[in-house]
Image (cartoon, rainbow, N blue to C red):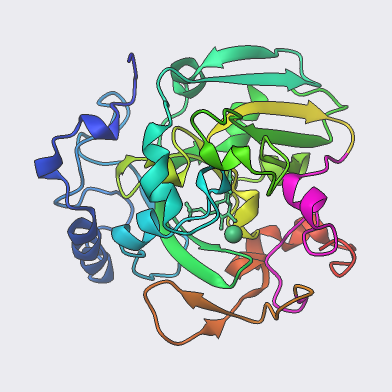
């Protein structure tokens, strides 16, 4: 596959021990030695030679110095209903997903729609690492070092028109590869959406990797969304379609349970889920619960998007 960004799986397995690497790395960061760049010993050499020093991506921590969740937890405890509703099912069943070749259709209210091979979609975008918290609506959370680039940079290439008020995303629909789609737990394909300003916000990421490696299939290979101030279900995996449109879409979760899942799904400890409180959460790997923060801790960056809105109504 002609990838400008060497694929993380091209790195010999012997060079990779993600958990150890990240523990070591956090230690360096604590010591203040590795501030801006991911030039720390042990980071797999995946960089594009032209844009970055070999051996590192620029890395930014948006998790206030927390240690990333263990690789084992992040890759074995997943929500990916296309492979079953059990947390352990995606890790076991996603192997059969064929992620190469892969293409993405960009359509709707834009001047340059098209169907692009994954390589062409990704080529213009230098990768960076961002360490984000991600909180599931079920009350657990993780800290993940994603590899990706801002969604807005990708969307702008297709020149959305003034009618592009919303962006809709769809996951692959193929029950042969995704056995969970044989059951109508959700309306398939899994559909999510963002308001255009949320989609263009610099924190909104397209991720193609994590922990310095290619995304595991159970985590949404070959490309997924990561919206760190929203409940995890907004961060749609294995995307094949992106559409600009004028009307607010009905997402899979809204359709399944409209009283429980709204369009916005911003992390908000003051608005309970109808069946449980959202005040606290458990970081996977920890025992005691901690307080959930407004907008998952990203309020300084994103609260302005919702100024004047009633967040009880627009949950
Ligand atoms: N296509 C698709 N995307 C999805 C889901 C899903 O079932 N299908 N689950 C969502 C939910 S509920 C969460 S919490 C996150 C989990 O991401 P992770 O498994 O990488 O932690 O993925 C989201 N993206
Ligand atoms: Mo979730």
Q: Quadrant of ligand 2?
A: bottom right
Residue name at image x 25 percent, y 59 percent: 22
Question: What residue lies at 65% left-to-right and 58% top-to-bottom?
Answer: 230
Q: Is residue 158 visible?
A: no
**Residue closer to the observer: 232 or 291:** 232
Predominant secondary structure in magenta? loop
**In this rendering, position of residue 33 left or right of residue 256:** left
Which quadrant would residue 216 be assigned to in this image?
top left
Q: Is residue 264 left or right of residue 123?
A: right
Which image quarter: residue 82? Answer: top right
Q: With respect to residue 78, does 49 lie above or below?
A: above
Identify the residue shown where x is 70% and y is 14%.
Answer: 113
Q: Quadrant of the N terminus?
A: top left
**Name of the residue lying farthest toward the front:** 182
Picture coordinates of residue 188, whole percent (x, y) = 69, 37
The range drawn in magenta is 248-272
Q: Nearer the viewer, residue 214 or 88?
A: 88
For residue 247, say whether it is visible: yes
Give the x, y percent position of residue 153: 59, 31
268 within the magenta span: yes
Q: Residue at x 25, y 58 (%)?
A: 34
């Amino acid at each position: 596959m002609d990838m400008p960004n060497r694929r993380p799986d091209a790195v010999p397995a012997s060079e990779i021990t993600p958990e150890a690497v990240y523990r070591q790395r956090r230690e360096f960061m604590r010591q203040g030695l590795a501030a801006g760049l991911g030039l720390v010993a042990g980071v797999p050499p995946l960089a594009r030679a032209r844009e970055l020093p070999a051996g590192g991506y620029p890395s930014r921590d948006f998790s206030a110095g927390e240690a990333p969740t263990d690789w084992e937890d992040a890759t074995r405890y997943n929500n990916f209903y296309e492979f079953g509703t059990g947390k352990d099912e995606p890790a076991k069943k996603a192997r059969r997903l064929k992620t190469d070749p892969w293409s993405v259709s960009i359509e709707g209210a834009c001047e340059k729609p098209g169907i692009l091979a994954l390589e062409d979609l990704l080529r213009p975008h230098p990768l960076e690492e961002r360490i984000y918290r991600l909180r599931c609506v079920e009350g657990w959370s993780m800290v993940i070092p994603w590899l990706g680039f801002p969604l807005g940079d990708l969307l702008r290439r297709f020149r959305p028109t003034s009618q592009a008020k919303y962006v809709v995303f769809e996951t692959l629909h193929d029950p042969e590869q995704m056995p969970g789609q044989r059951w109508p737990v959700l309306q398939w394909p899994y559909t999510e959406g963002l308001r255009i300003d949320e989609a263009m916000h610099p924190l909104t990421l397209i991720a193609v990797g994590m922990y310095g490696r290619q995304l595991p299939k159970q985590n949404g290979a070959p490309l997924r969304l990561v919206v760190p101030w929203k409940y995890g279900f907004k961060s749609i995996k294995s995307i094949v379609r992106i559409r600009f449109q004028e009307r607010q879409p009905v997402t899979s979760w809204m359709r399944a349970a409209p009283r429980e899942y709204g369009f916005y799904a911003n992390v908000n400890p003051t608005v309970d889920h109808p069946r449980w409180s959202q005040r606290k959460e458990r970081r996977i790997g920890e025992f005691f619960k901690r307080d959930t923060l407004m907008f998952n801790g990203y309020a300084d960056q994103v609260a302005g998007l919702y100024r004047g809105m009633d967040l009880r109504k627009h949950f």
